[in-house]
Image (tube, rainbow, N blue to C red):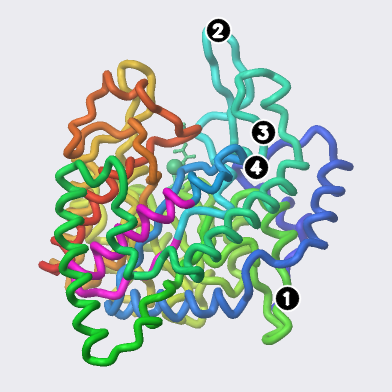
Amino acid sequence: MSIPDLEALHALGPAQQPTYPDKGAVDAAVARLRTMPPLVFAGECDDLTAKIAAVTRGEAFLLQGGDCAETFAGVTADNVRNKLRVLLQMAVVLTYAASVPVVKVGRLAGQYAKPRSSDFETRDGVTLPAYRGDAVNGFDFTSEARIPDPQRLVDVYNSSAATLNLVRAFVTGGYADLRQVHTWNTDFVRESPVGQQYEAMANEIERALTFMKAIGADPDEFHRVDFHSSHEALVLEYEHALTRIDSRTDLPYDVSGHFVWIGERTRQLDNAHVELLSHIRNPIGVKLGPTTTPDDALALAAKLNPQNEPGRLTFITRFGAGRIRDGLPNLVEKVTAAGVEVAWVCDPMHGNTFEASSGYKTRRFDDVIDEVQGFFDVHRSLGTWPGGIHVELTGDDVTECVGGGEELLEVDLGHRYESVCDPRLNRVQSLELAFLVAEMLRKA
Ligand SMILES: O=C[C@H](O)[C@H](O)COP(=O)(O)O
Ligand SMILES: C=C(OP(=O)(O)O)C(=O)O
Ligand SMILES: [Mn+2]
């Protein structure tokens, strides 16, 4: 299998691409990226495919989470550690409380490019190009900052490399050791009811580990975890420059991340994103919104996974709490009836965004839970496996989504709203979600 030309992809008229003012600068950035070493190895991508195949078979659960949009300024040790920590805590809750293996995938080390509903943003009568993520332009509301700069693609590479380096050190160097289950529950979260619920569970895990050690299990078994990176494959220059032929298999892999997905706004069947991802061998996802027909989903599966290999393709549904119970059954039923091998994952964020009266984009914690519950209900009624959740979250104590045990209100949003795109669950809300999903999984 070959890699399609970048020019040929652009000729398809891809949606949501930056309009760069300087073609020479784009060529220089792409040429630089083509010389850079891979961020991930093809064999690691294959390992993740095998894990997602277990999700497809109903034997494992996918936890995929992280920022809506990473930022270059956010590449700090604290920020990366906090995100990893909340994901590890969520994974341990899901694994222990539901007795199911959890496949851990971060929305990190590459999640820098954003599709937007509008090409422009207006503030106080001034209209400028929309912010499209640090991969493309700057968040500052000035005309200079909003000009797309291809040098940023090289910065994406470097920031992703730094993030991944730290994540790899954390997950192999002892931080993710299951015996650290208490240590992850530090500071403010310990004081919250969900922190105490976690603490009680951590005590049980500790006892179980002591028991296993006593009967001769090797403690090094608990030392490291598998953790994978993922992002939306959006800017074609970047993803194309990092698509390489694997020397083992002679097949193309996008080595910018282990798992890449196609967004709701770029999943047109005959367009560039589907074309490029149809050629790579990574495990991939496609976001499916409420307008997706069964024929759309079947055509995407035929194009993206013609051999119908389990683990290759994940459908990430994002219908909204109000639409999932009516909309999802027909899709799952027809795709299942056609014998398509796919992991079904629920993104309970993107169908539930609204603007608060203060102007902040937000989501209600209850809507998030309601959509996940609807997802479980639909799959239970059809006898299919609710394979995972895909969430926007952060390890910090932000105030971006309303509700949850802390009962955050719309008036609280301004207190600590740090997302440069969509509102994320904070650490307490993320842990609460994990306990509620564990309960749903137990019943499933
Ligand atoms: O993260 C997803 C999209 O980029 C985001 O939801 C679009 O937001 P917008 O409607 O503010 O452009
Ligand atoms: C852009 C995103 O989602 P969607 O494509 O589902 O709107 C996202 O995951 O941030
Ligand atoms: Mn988002």
Instruction: Tell me how far mark 2 sits from mark 1, CA to CA.
Output: 49 Å
Q: Where is residue 402 in the image (x, y as percent from the top left)?
A: 25, 32
| Residue type at numbered disc 1 | Ile
Disc 2: which residue: 125
Q: In percent of the image, x 34 and y 55: which residue is there?
A: 317
Q: What SS does tag 2 mark?
A: loop
Specify the quadrant that holds the C terminus: bottom left
Work out whether mark 4 precedes mark 2 in sequence or the reverse, and give the earlier one. Answer: 2
User: Given contact means CB atoms under 8 Å apart, are the residues at marks 3 and 1 in contact?
Assistant: no
Q: Which amino acid does label 4 sit on?
A: Ala
Q: Which residue has dot 4 on it?
A: 135
* Left-right relation of 127 to 313: right
Residue 322 visible somewhere in the drawing: no
State the separation of the CA atoms marked 3 and 2: 21 Å
Q: Is 207 placed above or below 190 here? A: below
| Dot 3 or dot 1, earlier in sequence | 3
The answer to which of 97 and 251 lies nearer the viewer is 97
Which image quadrant for residue 406?
Answer: top left
Q: Residue 245 bears which disc, if any? A: 1
Mark 4 touches mark 1? (CB < 8 Å): no
Residue at which label 3 appears:
137
Q: Are marks 3 and 2 in contact (CB under 8 Å)?
A: no
